[in-house]
Image: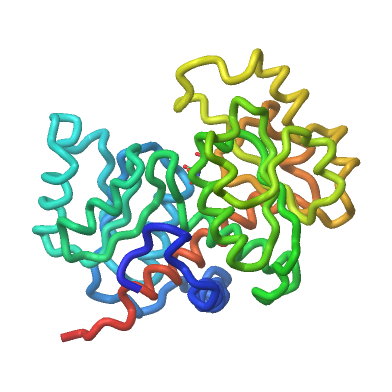
Amino acid sequence: MRHLLSSADLEPDDVTAILDLAEEMADVQHRSIKKLPALRGRTVVNLFFEDSTRTRSSFEIAGKWLSADVINISAKGSSVSKGESLRDTVLTVAAMGVDALVIRHMTSGAPQQVTGWIDAHVVNAGDGTHEHPTQALLDAFTLRRHFGGDTGSFANRRIAIVGDITHSRVARSNVLLLKKLGALPVLVAPPTLMPSGVDSWDCEVSADLDAVLGGVDAVMMLRVQRERMSGGYFPTPREYTIGYGLTRDRLTALKPGTAICHPGPMNRGLEISADAADAANSLVLDQVTAGVAVRMSVLYQLLGGEDES
Ligand code: NCD
């Protein structure tokens, strides 16, 4: 694997290989000394132009546990805030001798563009409203464990992806990946938050959460991304919750064992209630834990096999 830019680039066998290696990496999390020598001497730069808690820190921990040198650069506090262009910033970082660049950017397609400017491996850590492939991989890792352990356990599983689909790179990456694994994603959103052209996503679409909830194996709630909204996508937060929130009442509609996921950060009380976020079947913190193992696996797949000379 040269870069990881999109779930669309991954074949089912690639996904299985990444998730299987992540299972091995996950063992490191339970050791008292969390260190493997695999990427000693490699340098990974996390270049983040948007805010992040989970993604940035888990890439950092993943690189460090594999013994890579990890440097974090965020737009705030770098020369980007003095007006430096993306290209100049990336060329500057690459000129120091970087092996992998993990990039989050508010423009869809930015990581793809970066691959044309530098030789380092590029990982898309979220680009605008386009894709977030490592989030989809860590969601698949978490659900694979929940469903029974192998990639085949996704066959015909119905997975509702609910909420602000229009602005969600997590939804896009998940639909692509879940379909490759044989699952059946069901997109649920108010018409104003369902992207135009959703027909080409080739999956079930609904505006009625209550009609969908009882028939799914997992429900993935999405954050309402108010920072990307310029107008009124719904009348009031309260009306959004009534129509599309995973409220306490809606929990009773789920089949026993239905997994509850959310990529975080959660707006508790808006798209997800505290009862749902903290329910016995909530996998929200398992997703965070999986993020480290999956990103270790991805970094190893990109950098691990390279000739040391
Ligand atoms: C997501 C993101 O940034 O795309 N969060 C994450 O990576 N855990 C989803 C979101 O911000 O709502």
Residue 305 screen position, x and y as percent:
32, 83
User: Visible in this render: residue 193?
Assistant: yes
Colour pattern: rainbow
Viewer-proximal residue among 78 and 19: 19
Answer above or below: position of 216 versus 296.
Answer: above
Residue at x 77%, y 23% (from the top left corner): 242
Answer above or below: position of 268 versus 231.
Answer: below
Residue at x 87%, y 33% (from the top left corner): 249
24 relative position to 236: left or right: left
52 relative position to 107: left or right: right
User: Visible in this render: residue 31?
Assistant: no
Residue 299 screen position, x and y as percent:
37, 69
Viewer-proximal residue among 36 and 24: 24
Residue at x 35%, y 42% (from the top left corner): 108
9 relative position to 256: left or right: left
Residue at x 25%, y 46% (from the top left corner): 73
How many numbered callouts? 0
- The quadrant the C terminus occupies is bottom left
- The quadrant the N terminus occupies is bottom left
Quarter of image, res 99: bottom left
Quarter of image, res 150: bottom right
13 relative position to 222: left or right: left
Viewer-proximal residue among 243 and 191: 191
